[in-house]
Amino acid sequence: MRVVVIGASGHIGSYLVPLLVDAGHEVVTVSRGQSEPYRRRSVWERTEQIVADRVAEDEAGTFGKRIADLGADAVIDLICFEPDSARQLSEALRGRVQHVLHCGTIWVHGPAIETPMTEDVPRRPFGDYGVKKAAIEAYLLTEARTGRLPATILHPGHIVGPGWRPINPAGHLQLSVFAQLAKGEPLALPNFGLETLHHVHADDVARSFMAALERRNASVGESFHVVSPAALTLRGYAESVAWWYGQDARLEFLPYERWKDTVEPADAEATWNHIAHSPNSSVAKAAALLDWRPRYTSLEAVYEAVSWYAAKGELPALD
């Protein structure tokens, strides 16, 4: 099968492209050409590589046609964030591909009523990112269910793995939080530290795309959560990281309105977005329809990332 991967050199693509090549697919990678894949770079020599600036080409109205003219059987879109961009690509691909797979996000959901949350609950997104991703999901599912475009949507959690920073136990991206816990230093968390994060290893996300591609009949017209087996509370996450370093976590708890003044404004905003969502998602649907199950727990995935930074000397060494 000829498969086009848009955004191929990013977090997910760095794992997905080798899986596709190893499975015998003819792979076309599309990226801006500004970054190198995180792993198995030699695999890219066995792909057709296209450099494209999606934002500029969307503005010019040419991106969809450019992808359609590549003659793919399947298109995997890892970097679509605007409803208009999704619409342009979909209109160009109608009648020309067998399958379109879109990378969504668990932030298509807003606050949960029951947890773990399933894919069939009504969408209540908030924030620009979640609202736009929910609109894209609704559009693509309508396209699929009305027979105009065979589309599948996969919704990852907080993607993590070697090569990029995990969302930390305080709900933002600063590595200093891991260093504080490693050294046994006090760490302040918002509220009671009982809000949740739901990570997923990039390799598990890549395997979910493979599963959906291989089980087209079961996946077209559907969306799937792609997360680790269980979400983490901020408090439990912090305690676990401290234990990795042989420490007992010295945690302090502050109401968010006081806690936000202890960090940089950008970090406070990131934390608010994470704890306001407090995702806790079910993967039962993906297991039942796609035979996909995550290999990594949240802590195992984060441990790999922390180990990678420790090996680079950016965090204390793990035993």
Image (cartoon, helix red, strand yellow):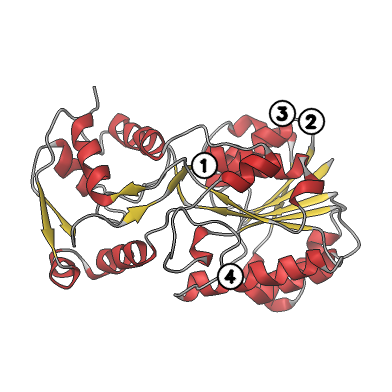
| Residue wearing tag 4 | 134
Circle 4: element type: helix
Label 2 Cα neighbours within 10 Å, binned few <14 / some 14-19 / many ≥20: few
Residue lying farthest top?
319
Q: Residue 292 location, x and y as percent?
A: 63, 38
Query: Who's the residue at 27% across and 63% down the image?
Result: 267
Say which amino acid is labelled 2: Gly
Q: Is residue 286 left or right of residue 230?
A: right
Q: Quadrant of residue 86?
A: bottom right
Instruction: Place residue 250 in its image quadrant.
Output: top left
Sequence-first tag of 4 and 1: 4
- Whether label 4 touches label 2, CB < 8 Å: no
212 or 8: which is nearer to us? 212
Q: Secondary structure at mark 1?
A: helix
- Residue 306 on image: x %, y %: 32, 36
Q: CA distance from mark 4 to mark 2?
A: 33 Å
Secondary-structure class at tag 2 = loop
Q: Which residue is mark 3?
A: 22
Q: In the rendering, which numbered label is found on residue 189?
A: none
| 106 is higher (above) or lower (below) than 138 | above
Which residue was labeled with disc 2?
24
Where is the N terminus found, in terms of image quarters?
top right
Disc 3: CA contacts within 10 A as few (<14), some (14-19) or many (>=20): few
Residue position marked by numbered label 1 in the rendering: 202
Question: Does the image show residue 201?
Answer: yes
Say what amino acid the circle numbered 1 marks. Answer: Ala
Q: Residues within 10 Å of mark 1 (few under 14, many from 20)?
A: many
